[in-house]
Image (spheres, helix red, strand yellow):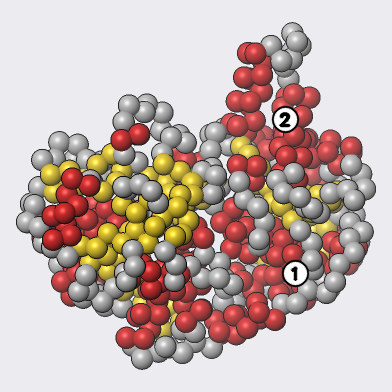
Amino acid sequence: MSVKYIFITGGVVSSLGKGLTSAAIGYLLEMRGVKIAMLKLDPYLNVDPGTMNPFQHGEVYVTDDGAETDLDLGHYYRFTNTPLSRASNATSGQIYDTVIKKERRGDYLGKTVQVIPHVTDEIKEKILACSKQEPNIRVVLVEIGGTVGDIESLPFLEAIRQFRYEHPQDCINIHLTYVPYLKAAGEVKTKPTQHSVQALREIGIIPDMILCRCEEALSQELKEKISLFCNVPKDAVFDEKDVDHTVYEVPLDLHRQKLDERICQTLHLQTHEPDLTRWNQLLHAVLNPKGKVVIGIVGKYMDHQDAYKSVFEALHHAAIDAGVGLEIRKFESDRIVEEGSVEKAIGGCDGYLVPGGFGERGWEGKVLTAKYCREKKIPYFGLCLGMQVLIVEFARHVLGLKEAHSTEVNPNTSEPVVSMLSQQRGIQDLGGTMRLGSYPCAIKKGSLAEKCYGANLIQERHRHRYEFNNAYKKAFEDKGMVFSGTLDQGQLCEISEVSGHPWMLGVQFHPEFKSKLLDAHPLFRDFIRHIATGKGLA
């Protein structure tokens, strides 16, 4: 049985939601009994997004095998059970790097190395490799980043044109486009979609289906117009309107329009009807919460909605699991110091979360947040840098080490309670050189962490260069710090908690990367449930 391929392209403007759409389609196919794999092709020349500012490209998502990837892989993980690895994301930088290395080795036997066929062949190899990650994969969904017409995307579009030419019975193209509503004219306009499809056809790709991003559902008349001008059947034009409450409504809306049925018919896939009962139940919980919890997130990229995407989603998963509503309040950490009063700057939340990050900016504001939560007995959850903040605050104000710091922020500190990992010293390159990927963590019996996980050995994903300095371990433990998680068979501190506090815990890893709507992460789940219980909501 041949593997089928769905290529998902975008037109008119960026940020239409190709990643969410791809993930929603993947979920519907899985519910029909189809094993899928997913691949994101990114046109930028960075080898990976690991060195990119979150303001530029949002969060960096990390896979179990240590790949730093596009944030859309987070969508894939939250919606589906697709295998995710280095084979699930490829950039122009990676492609060109591979081609140039082959040329330097003489692999091309003296040929002139060109975009066609050498670059496009490498892209096609990436697509085939994705289909071979695990046995019995039946459908590969390939999302092409960027917008049709971008010069950066052309090699990828040419590659999928060739791929479809070589596998004519096994490929379809779904084109996601924008249908704007012009308020001044009071009209919905299809011309941008027409031009987008025209640009795609000039490249040699004929869309099989068109998904129209829009504010409101399109009329049948407008769908027929798009069908006529874009040369696709009437029943192959779908709208994808803005959702009312949560992105998790998207699969249900697409299923209501029978998009998944159309895909299976076109690819000649024999499937059963999907059972969406559990998904519907969780959405019912979203619409009918038993009260609300308010969580303050203190970070330095709060003005960018995608910088902490997985953190926001993990909190929502936990709130839905607890049956409560969630309000997230965003605080820029550097403004806390400017305000002069922590209470005035961030007060009024039921709990606080300090996410991961790098660098000095906003550091002291995060330390003040941890101090505020410890002294006021307010639930605190620290992720990666957020755990290091917890450590430094505790050292300064409980151990009395006034100069306590992280060597990332102050390399010359006399009290380096957080310092660089030994294996990181001497590394010059920044990209892909941190402690990355999944590692085993042994959990201490009787700890809050054990209560959350219900296990004594777990696996979590990492992305960091610095760690707790074990030279201070006994001093911390004598004052009530519990190191409840350590690298299995190792000394690295992975989880720390403050004894005597109702819920104050930091982790060196990134649990947000492993949370799903259907399976909220244990730490996030307990964090929210503790708060909800305290408010009489759970």
Residue position marked by numbered label 2 in the rendering = 122
Question: Of the residues under marks 1 and 2, which one precedes in the sequence?
Answer: 1
Percent of width and height locating residue 500: 20, 74
Q: Residues within 10 Å of mark 1 (few under 14, many from 20)?
A: some
Q: Secondary structure at mark 1?
A: helix
- For the residues marked 1 and 2, what is the alpha-carbon distance in whole angstroms? 32 Å
Q: Nearer the viewer, mark 1 or mark 2?
A: 1
Compared across the picture, whether 354 is left or right of 236 comes to left
Depth check, front residue: 70 or 444:
444
Q: Secondary structure at mark 2?
A: helix
User: Could one spot residue 304 in this view of the protein?
Assistant: no
Instruction: Identify the amino acid type marked 2.
Output: Glu
Q: Residues within 10 Å of mark 2 (few under 14, many from 20)?
A: some
**Residue occupying image coordinates x 61% and y 37%:** 91
Compared across the picture, whether 418 is left or right of 196 comes to left
Depth check, front residue: 76 or 303:
76
Instruction: Identify the amino acid type marked 1.
Output: Met
**Residue occupying image coordinates x 36% and y 28%:** 427
When asked about the image quadrant of residue 31, the answer is bottom right
Residue position marked by numbered label 1 in the rendering = 31
* Quadrant containing the C terminus in the rendered view: bottom left
